[in-house]
Amino acid sequence: MNEHEQTIREIERLERWLASFPTPGPDEVTVARVKSAVRRAVAGGDAAADRMTRRAVAATKLTVRNEIEALGSTARPIAFRPWAPLAVAAAAIAFAFVTIWTIPGGDPVTDPELAAFVEVMTREDDAVTTELLNLEEDLTLLTGHFADDGDRTSPSLLNVGDLLEDVSNDVSVDEQEI
Amino acid sequence: MTEQKLRDLIRRAQKRDADAFDELVDHFGPRLFGFCYRLTGSRCDAEDLLQELFLRVVRQLERYHHEGQFEAWLFRIATNLARDRIRRLRRRPEHVSISREDDRGEDDASSILVGTGSEASPGEVAERREQVDRLQQALERLPNAEREVVMLRHFSQLSFAEIAAAMGTPIGTALARGHRGLLKLRAIMEPHA
């Protein structure tokens, strides 16, 4: 038996050991609740979800704008922002990318993975995605400001962050690789 | 469930047949719940994630093209949802562990044990509850990547090759993570074995 086969055997043995433990499962109430929610969603269709997303974006936008206005004249010069190094790094990467991309005589995008990357990087975002990106940028600015001042992040901002994640996940979670 | 039966169920669900969704919940729900519970360490979170997961399935199923990877698709959504939930919990200062003591009442623990019916004595229920908690604490000591592979293998019927494909890693990496995770898990649970 070679090493690979030995590893497989050991994994199988350990998996049998793990299977001997009690398995957590949902109770009947949970299953009924899930089924009920699914039935409501099936009956309501995607329109309800779309409306919820739009409302969430609108509420988020309002909260972020209010926070920005509340900051008022306390804003600092960009050079002192904690995210400034990140912006510089992103710009450098973008510059390098464009430079490599435009090397004369180069064979443009023969690598499928690179082509996919380019497609994602150069694709125009739809309106909702653009709005989310803008909001996330605003949030970064705000949380950076609070952190810079040694303040606790505003609870409303935490809620906004969660809301943004919910909206973002709604769009992308099932499309991500695990 | 046979492949043909699953294919029919998916086709019916894609036509928004609520009964077909019920069957999908019945068939996949328990394992997906267990998976979410083991990744988050919380019954409440697992319940929420299970519902969230199936709502996403309702929204996304029309775009799903079945090529025998439905289970991998479901568990990939579950993994991403659980990751997001864990990340959110860890961002909050009051949560230092993915398990929360207030989520582990006696009723909670006994209600999540599959096969714990009225025939089980209070002593047996307590013993099983203790095993569930010990295993959960041990799982939390594993790196995320190892815990995910071990739990994917445990709750899904995916092969290492399918897990590797879903995770975008070489099969050797998935095997190594599963092997290391299981070895660590046993060493934590049975240090003198």
Image (spheres, rainbow, N blue to C red):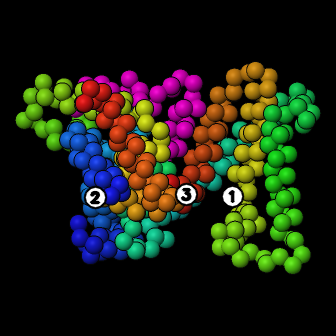
Q: Earlier in the sequence, mark 3 or mark 2?
A: 2
* Residue for point 18% across, 27% down: B127
Question: Which residue bears the numbered disc 1?
Answer: A128
User: Callout 1: few (<14), some (14-19), or many (20+) C-alpha neighbours within 10 Å?
Assistant: some
- The percent coordinates of residue B62 (x first, y second) are 46, 71
Read off the magenta span: B81-110
Q: Is residue A1 left or right of residue B41?
A: left
The three-letter amino acid code for the residue at tag 1 is Val
* SS majority, magenta: helix
Farthest residue to the front: give it. A1
User: Callout 2: few (<14), some (14-19), or many (20+) C-alpha neighbours within 10 Å?
Assistant: few
Question: Which residue bears the numbered disc 2?
Answer: A1
Mark 1–mark 2 distance (CA, rounded to whole Å):
56 Å
Instruction: Choose between B134 and A148: the one closer to the eye.
Output: B134
Q: Give the numbered dot on residue A176.
A: 3
Q: Is residue A46 left or right of residue B155?
A: right
Mark 1, secondary structure of its residue: helix
The three-letter amino acid code for the residue at tag 2 is Met
